[in-house]
Image (cartoon, helix red, strand yellow):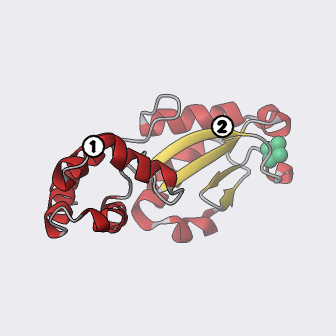
Amino acid sequence: MPNPFETVRGIVEKYRGDRFLLIKALFEIQDEVGYLSDPMLAMVADGFKISKTEVQGVATFYPHFLLKARPRYLIRCCSSVVCEICGSAKLREAIQKTLRLKNDEISQDGLFQLSAVACLGACDRAPALKINETLFGPLTGEMIPALLQKVASSGLQASSGLL
Ligand code: FES
């Protein structure tokens, strides 16, 4: 993957600081890099010779723009009562251990983020979780490393038939 800051530099240079093209440049950066971080907005401001506040104003006005990195796979692990009784805490522990995650941070490889959520509407499959929109369950902590490995290596579609 190319260095995101080089990508930003290239796009800013391409538009030669034409401020009428600022939004176009921001769209292109997001398409290439995936999001607009604070240092990236500062680079854009420098390149377009406008204040960072102005660039931030544009980036925060349009809901399309993401100001934080997003993982490829968001794991939503149910923490409502049925899943808790059936062992969802063990799933979260196994996920955090396998991915070496603390709380809601994104994994080092940028692939996964864990979030504890309320009932997924799949209590009959407790303990359950969703990876993006694909439901998995019932699961055990022992199943987690293989599931995450399969998703990371082959994608979600190939993994959805596992359970
Ligand atoms: S309590 Fe977990 S899916 Fe409903």
Instruction: From this view, report whether residue 153 is shown above or below residue 140.
Output: below
Quadrant of the frame with the N terminus: bottom left
- Find disc 1 in the rendering and name its residue: 51
- Residue occupying the point 71% across, 36% down: 88
- Label 1: how many residues lie within 10 Å, few (<14), some (14-19) or many (20+)? some
Instruction: From this view, report whether residue 91 is shown above or below residue 156.
Output: above
Q: Position of residue 44 (x, y in %)?
A: 24, 52
Name the element at disc 1.
loop
Q: Position of residue 125 (x, y in %)?
A: 80, 52
For the question of whether residue 134 can be seen, the reply is yes
Q: The residue under label 2 is which amino acid type?
A: Ala
Farthest residue, direction top: 102
Relative to 157, 1 lies left or right: left
Q: Are marks 1 and 2 in contact (CB under 8 Å)?
A: no
- Residue occupying the point 48% across, 33% down: 97
- Residue occupying the point 78% across, 33% down: 84
- Find disc 2 in the rendering and name its residue: 116
Give how far apart the Cα atoms at labels 1 and 2 are. 38 Å
Front-lying residue, 62 or 95: 62
